Amino acid sequence: MKETIGFPRALLYYYYYPAWRAFFESLGQTCEVSGKTTKAVIDSGIKVTVDEACLPVKAFHGHVLSLSGVCDRVFVPRLVSVERKAYICPKLMGLPDMVRHNCKGIRQIIDPCIDMSRNSRAYVRELYATGRLFTRNPLKISVARRKAKQAYDVFVRLLQAGLTPIDAMDRENRCYPNHFQDSGIFNDSVSGRDKDVRSPIIGVLGHPYIIYDSFLGMNVLDRLNLMGARVVTMDMLQRTVVEQAAAKSQKRVFWTIGRQLLGAGYYFLAPGTVDGCLQMSAFACGPDSFIAELLQQESARSRRKVPFMTIVVDEHTGEAGVLTRLEAFMDIVARSMLR
Amino acid sequence: MKLTFARLGNFHIAAKALFEALGIDVVLPPPPTKRTMSLGSLNSPEFACLPLKMNIGNYLEALEKGADTIVMVGGIGPCRLGLYGEVQRQILEGLGCDFKMIVVEPPQGRLDRLFRQLFEITGPQRIPQYIKALHLGWSKLAAIDSMEKLALKRRPFEESKGDISFAYEETLRCIDKARSPKEVASAVENGQRAIKSVCKKTDGNKPRIGIVGEVFMVLEPFVNCEIEKHLGEMGVVVHRSIYLSDWVVEHVVKDAFRILRKSKLPYELAKPYLCHFVGGHGVETIASTVDYARQGLDGVIQVAPFTCMPEIIAQDLLPTVSRDLGIPVMTLVLDEHSSGTGVLTRLEAFVDLVRMSQRQRR
């Protein structure tokens, strides 16, 4: 039986959708992604969640609601942990429960519990349990799993070649996997920068569901590009570089994305990598409140300072205000490059 | 070495006894005031939770008093508490403070790790000394909890307002002064007698309200605007979901001796609403609410610091629990801007509501 599975275009959609889609399509299901985030989507999400929830969680609820009636099931995974001894965010651990209680119109939710904090292969059982919803043949599930893995690997390599997840997903639709290698957007992450061209390089830090969502993130990436900057996000850096920089912290940060943000931040704030560092964060984001503080302390300690700014977004943020701050930031970056 | 640690309710009484019995100088942070809170929020990240801000305030005031070593608990997440030590160290270092920070990480089944961390604080000492110190600390902790339980139970029946709180605080002072478990026991006995002497005859019709939520906010009267005292003086019997000794057993003793399994009960109670651990006390908040509803309590108040991640999940789910089980639930989200008067007004309204629903049921 062919079913349509709905994917909310929010939270970790930006990291794992290629894998999820490959998995479900290989099992013969249709995948339907909710539309781009709009004011209406966010408003409907705000209505069903508590005020204290963060903007991305509210937006997620809005996306789920926009999928009701469009698809047979909605995919709301419980992403507890994707690596050993680390979590992502407590809110993702309670997400399916929140969605189930807040979005009454939703018929069925697929909520595999991905918890690799103790055992890095613990997800496999959940994968098979999810596959069993659609087929009784374990071989088909195993094929789907391999396809998902391939799709994910291709996606990650595209990211490290300098594409944003949005571009990478677009690109994947168009060309065959493995063709990207000779596209050579820029090969050696940031270090391969051209000495003659003095367009500023801006490192952007932030959870993927904020910086890549054009509405929540106020189009910051495009705006920076329009202002003549080259943008590098933490996903374009090599994992080893990020992990090495993050290891500078005396205590290992136990949020996966938080640790990557910290590592990328330490890397950006070290002189000679980027010309400015911009952090985007959601109002009242728990992990970001600490990561931002650690980065500010690092910035205060370093002798040659890289311009560093944090922008906090919530459902009330006006675009004009962000634009003004971005312009001021770029002026400071330009001045610091002259020195 | 002059040791200090952050305040959490009356925990400092037991911790001070433990360290002093091991021959360590302890400099306690002064009792929290508005200044503590301002110092803390001024120097902490804006969206950090209130416990971190209060801790920073405590440390700054203790360092002013001459402390030079800070002991703090660590953690393995996903709650932010696990990173408190690192963030606090960097904040204080950024302010130019001179101190040493010792972060005690959870033993996770390895006793040697716990003892090595203890040695780092205390220096090598004889084993009987440790046993004596632990015994004294534990007896004080248990004594404090038993006094708190008694005060919560009897406060609605006091003869004139403030009697019980006076007797209770006096007893705490005696417990603090006690130098042996025997003296602690006699202090508790005296306290119990004093509380009984100021009580009227109990009648059974007082509303009962449970308090659930984040441990620091529940245990620290200064940050929760003394809700337990206010509720008691309004004639409400308060049931509290967390006591210090339970917390120590669950997080230190059971974590060190893995043979003692952690209680699965909260997870079973919370299952229809929240079926996964979310860090902090998220699951326990839901579970205690379900438990209180089953016990027939008349209402539940959730106390949480602003931006607390686990409690936000619980807060999101509590309306459903309240509807399903027919128990009124109110959430108090508090931060450095909360005013006692505002909280008091909300408490009065909630108690009125609870009384009304109590009458309807009868």
Image: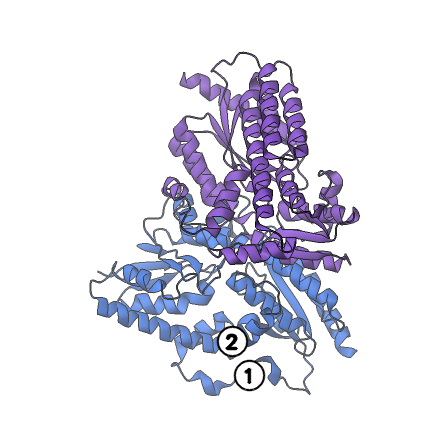
Chain colours: A blue, B purple
Secondary structure state at the residue bearing disc 1 = loop
Chain where mark 2 sits: A
List the residue tagged with mark 2.
A163
* Residue bearing the label numbered 1: A186
| Image quadrant assignment for residue B38 | top right
Q: Quadrant of the N terminus of chain A?
A: bottom left
Q: Residues within 10 Å of mark 1 (few under 14, many from 20)?
A: some
Residue B61 numbered tag: none
The amino acid marked with disc number 2 is Leu
Per the image, label 2 sits on a secondary structure element best described as loop
Q: Is residue A103 visible?
A: yes
Which residue is more in the foreground, B96 or A18? B96
Instruction: Residue A146 in the image: state x and y as whole percent.
Output: 32, 73
Q: Is residue B299 left or right of residue A282?
A: left
Please indicate whether residue A37 sits to the left or right of residue A293 in the image. left
Residue B287: name its quadrant. top left
Is B28 placed above or below A212 here?
above
Quadrant holding the C terminus of chain A: bottom right
Q: Earlier in the sequence, mark 1 or mark 2?
A: 2
Q: What chain is tagged by disc 1? A: A
- Position of A70 with respect to A49 (left or right) is left
Residue A280 against residue A142 in the figure, above or below: above
Q: Nearer the viewer, residue A243 or A1?
A: A243
